[in-house]
Image: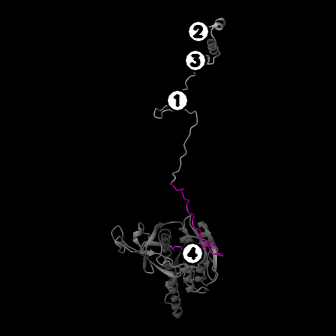
Amino acid sequence: MLSMNRSSLSRAPLLVQVLAALLFSGVFGAPALLAQSQQPAPAPQQPPPPPPDSDSGGPGSDSGPIVVPKKKAPADEPPPKAAPAAPQIKAPAGMPPVSIQVDVPEVTVDVGVLLEKTHQFVPGLKPGNFKVYEDGKEQKVIGFKRVEAPITALLICEFAATNYQFIYDMRNAAFTFAEQLRPQDYVAMMTFDMRTQIVTDFTQDKRQILESINSLRIPGFSERNLFDALYEGLDRVSRIDGHKYIIVIASGRDTFSKITLDKMMDKIRKTPDVTIFTVSTGNVARIMSEGRGGWTGQMRDMDYLQADNQMKTFAQMTGGMFFQPRFVGEMPDDFNAINQAIRSKYELIYHPQNSKQDGTFRKLQVQLVDAEGHPLQIQDEKHKNLKYELIYRNGYKARQEVE
């Protein structure tokens, strides 16, 4: 070990003294190196733990920020284009907006199928059993159903100062009709002689109708203005929605009406959704007086024949029925037939091939056919053919384009 004191250093040569001074002053850095070797070395930095393996199923650390790289659109992909705006059509200046509406005509035909002998309704018919013709051209039926619903009816009775047999028959017929009404039916009653009179407005109370019939005892005038009364009745029921029925109980003679027969028939054609049933009165008195009284008797007989023809025409034009009961005992069967025809019908709907709205009259014809297109044969349990009749409106008046 190198050890020097000041006494020995003083005796050494000059060069040795200089070297010793430099050694002790730390010029060569030995003390610094020694100090550095004595300091503890710093602990090496630990690398950050690796991210959890997603396949290992262990929980991931939720510490530290999560950086999601932003997806950049490819440079060659063009930006999406906006949808083109709907074209707008502008009306010329000064013209209001215009909308176009197309109406497809639709015709509804109510058809009653009744046996001629018993007036029973024939059920169970299918759409293929019906063929509808308009002006001789077959139409395609697009709707079919059986209709049985409450009725809305107007009872028009002739109450004039003539033979009592006519009033007797009228009262009995009206009573028979009122007895067959159901609680849901709406019925009104109107009488006529020279003028028309509303005895009872539309009601569902059968007792009001019966009381009104019972009050018809003392007539006023002897005139029988049938056309005026029926024209007014059609005008009244045309304001009611749905299908309506008019039951006319009268002799059929018209003596003093302002409305002519031509106007009457034109009114019937123009009034939709109305079916007329007519019942003739005084048939027994007419039969007993037939052929008597010379020239005046023959004129009277001609008047009644014309009256019957008018009553029958009114009924046939609207799909109704005409009856001429001779005795009171026939009236329940007659009104039962009316009841069957009113409450049980087949409703057929079609779009006419002639779609012109020109106000012309279109004639209708309905036929019953079997599966092979032949006329339908109806048989009873003994395989005996039964005659039947089809009851429907014989035509309709097309709408006017301006209506």
Circle 4 sits in a helix, a strand or a loop, which is it? helix
Q: Which residue is mark 1?
A: 49
Residue 131 seen in this snapshot: yes
Query: Would you say 9 lies left or right of 150 here?
Result: right
Q: 3 or 249, which lies in front?
A: 3
Judge by depth and name the residue closer to the eye, 313 or 136: 136
Could you say which quadrant of the image residue 225 lies in?
Answer: bottom right
Query: How far from the left and from the top, in percent, is residue 123?
Result: 42, 67
Camera-side residue: 243 or 292?
A: 243
Work out how far the residue at label 2 is from the one at label 3, CA to CA, in angstroms: 21 Å
Would you identify the image quadrant in which residue 36 lies? top right
- Principal SS element in the magenta part? loop
Whole-percent x, y for residue 130 in the image? 41, 72
Is the N terminus in the top left, top right, bottom left or bottom right quadrant? top right
SS category of the residue bearing label 1: loop
Disc marking residue 2? 2
Q: Residue furthest top?
A: 7
The three-letter amino acid code for the residue at tag 1 is Pro
Foreground mark, 1 or 2? 2
Give the labeled residue for mark 4: 171
Which numbered disc flags the more N-terminal residue, 1 or 2?
2
Which quadrant of the structure image shows residue 30? top right
The image shows residue 328 at horizontal and vertical percentages of: 51, 75
Q: Which residues are magenta?
A: 76-105
Q: Is residue 155 magenta?
A: no
Q: Secondary structure at mark 2?
A: loop
Mark 1 to mark 2: distance in Å?
53 Å
**Which amino acid is tagged 4?**
Arg
Pointer 1 or 3: first along the chain: 3
